[in-house]
Image (tube, helix red, strand yellow):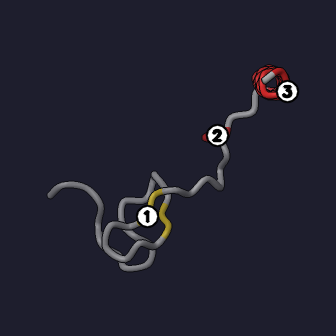
Amino acid sequence: MFEIGLVLAILAGATFAVGRVRRQRGIDVLADADFVDLPCPWCHAQTREEDSACPSCHQEFGAR
């Protein structure tokens, strides 16, 4: 039982330390210019948030 508590304490400490280091360095995953996570709803090709139409199938985004 003691070993499980020790492992949990070490994991919690490591998570806290990594979080502090990332916050100090200002790492922001969403600020990455190559971040692509918006698939086209029709052909599922990768798109960017600023695209007005799919670069693959040329379907326009947004309501008509």
Q: Which residue is mark 3?
A: 3
* Residue pictured at 43% horizontal, 64% vertical: 39
Left or right: 31 as drawn, with respect to 14: left
Q: Which residue is mark 1?
A: 39
Q: Secondary structure at mark 2?
A: helix
* Residue pictured at 29% horizontal, 61% vertical: 61
Q: Quadrant of the C terminus?
A: bottom left
Q: Secondary structure at mark 1?
A: strand
Residues 43 and 5: in front is 5
Neighbour tally class for label 1: few under 14, some 14-19, many 20 plus, Cα within 10 Å: some
Q: Amino acid at mark 3?
A: Glu
Question: Disc 2 vs disc 3: Cβ atoms closer than 8 Å?
Answer: no
* Residue pictured at 78% horizontal, 28% vertical: 4
| Figure quadrant of residue 30 | top right
Q: Which residue is mark 2?
A: 31
Q: Position of residue 38 (x, y in %)?
A: 45, 58
Q: Quadrant of the N terminus?
A: top right
Residues 31 and 13: in front is 13
Eyeballing the image, is 18 above or below 34? above
Q: Secondary structure at mark 3?
A: helix
Measured in 3D between alpha carbons, the distance from the residue under mark 2 to the one under mark 3, in whole angstroms, is: 40 Å
Measured in 3D between alpha carbons, the distance from the residue under mark 2 to the one under mark 1, in whole angstroms, is: 18 Å
Q: Nearer the viewer, mark 2 or mark 1?
A: 1
Measured in 3D between alpha carbons, the distance from the residue under mark 3 to the one under mark 1, in whole angstroms, is: 45 Å
Left or right: 12 as drawn, with respect to 51: right
Q: Position of residue 52 (x, y in %)?
A: 36, 60
